[in-house]
Amino acid sequence: MDSIVKQLDLDLVLLATLEPSPLYGLEILKEVNIRTKGALEFKGGSLYPALHRLVKANWVETYWEPSTNGGAPRKYYRLTDSGLSMYARKKEQWTRAKSAMESLIERLTFGKVSHVA
Amino acid sequence: MLRKRPIDDYIYRATLGLPKHNRVDTSAELRVHLNSRVKELMAGGFPKDESEHLAVQEMGPVEPVNLAFLGHGFTNKLGWIVLVAAVLGGVFYFFNQKHENPLREAVLDGKDFATILANNKLERPTYRKFEVDIPGNVNQVEWALIGWDTFKILDISREKPPALNFLGTKVSILVGLGTPKVNTQTECKEGSAAQMVLYSTTPEGSTTNVSPEIICLHPGLRPRNPNIKSQIKKPTYNEFASSSIGNFNKMNFNEWIPVLNWSVIDFNNAARNKLYLNDPTKHLAVVVRLGNEIESKIGTAFYRETFRIDTKGKPITTIYNFGTDIDYGFGKNASDMWTVQETQTAK
């Protein structure tokens, strides 16, 4: 869902998807779908403006390459050095936020349970 | 009529407003994406038109995509209408608010009193304060002392609004009523008597100093009727009565606006009051006008006179007329604006 991706930080999703290897637009959508086992899915309409924003920020660069199956050439996206360091930073922020949220939720659940008990 | 393919329509609307090179690049990328999806859907058994429709559907609504590409919403009619309306509204507001109630009476504050007390020339029994908003396109402000009944200019002062920029500025004027504490002989030329002091102040933070202006009345401007015999005298404080006629909602360029008027009343000689009605020195007003270009004809009704004594002790009247053929434009010397005619009036 688009709204869930927005809450999760679309930039981090895209940087994480492009980190292993360069991909073109449709591949990115499919890769996100596969790697999250269908839990994260967003529309193509949200993808391209977001990719263009990453290019403007110099986190990602593009190049055109002929299609391997004889179709039209495709525009590939790959992380730049500054994109890689941004990815590392965002990953760390996300890990800290995730861990903080987990402890918060655990404590809340524990508090609720103890209150009921 | 040829119907646009949904893919073409989507690409057109998604990339609307992008710079040409960027638009071509983005269109190609979107087309590759959509065509690939169409192929996949067709391989799954969908006919071509349905595949195109579904591929476009998968992209989601096009407006947010276009907005995201551009970073602003001025690609559609509504966006432009809003922009144009906002600009026009702003321009209209700018030009109108500057003229809204441009002249008003203000309350004297501590700073004004400090200024008055610090300057001997400004020490007067009574002060009234007025403020004028000066729009940015004004390059000169004129204050004049006139005989109210006859509307003759007795004295005129011109100043360039200080610290003026295109946004305009505000000028305050203090009008002192009563006999000024000045040396008439040194401050007023040709034996005229000091009648009032004007000084204008500039907006907060300005470095321009307060500039007092002594307004003098010329004895020769006493009644033009030779049967009326009177002599100039310095009125005392209790001979002044004033009323405000300020607070104007609109101020047109080159139009005189009264700021304050007052009359000199001779309490000791009620019978002479009738005569004063035709005496320009008895009913006075301060008027102001803002100028950017004064038409030559506007001043034809005004004149001023000065009197001096020649070597044989005879008075000579000098009449300064506004001529209709004179280009009364600002930026010229004041003397260029007047024609001078000297006449021997007394024998």
Image (cartoon, rainbow, N blue to C red):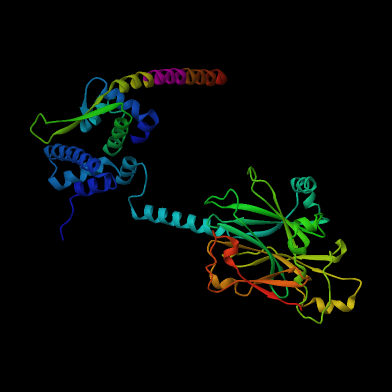
Report which quarter residue B98 is drawn in. Answer: bottom right
- Whether residue B158 is situated above or below residue B41 in the rendered picture: below
- Whether residue B181 is situated above or below residue A44 in the rendered picture: below
Report which quarter residue A28 is drawn in. Answer: top left
The answer to if A52 sits in the magenta stretch is no
- Please give left or right for residue A80 compared with residue A73 in the image: right
Residue drawn 57% across and 71% down? B298
- Whether residue A60 is situated above or below residue B292 in the rendered picture: above
Residue A23 locus on image (x, y percent): 21, 27
Between A84 and B126, the one nearer to me in the picture: B126
What quarter of the picture does the N terminus of chain B occupy?
bottom left
- Please give left or right for residue A79 compared with residue B131 in the image: left
Bounds of the magenta span? Answer: A91-102
The answer to if A99 sits in the magenta stretch is yes
Residue drawn 83% across and 65% down? B240
For the stretch drawn in magenta, what is the main secondary structure? helix
Residue drawn 22% across and 29% down? A62
Q: Can residue B245 be seen in this view?
A: no
Residue B297 locus on image (x, y percent): 55, 73
What quarter of the picture does the C terminus of chain B occupy?
bottom right
Between B155 and B56, the one nearer to me in the picture: B155
Residue B311 locus on image (x, y percent): 75, 68
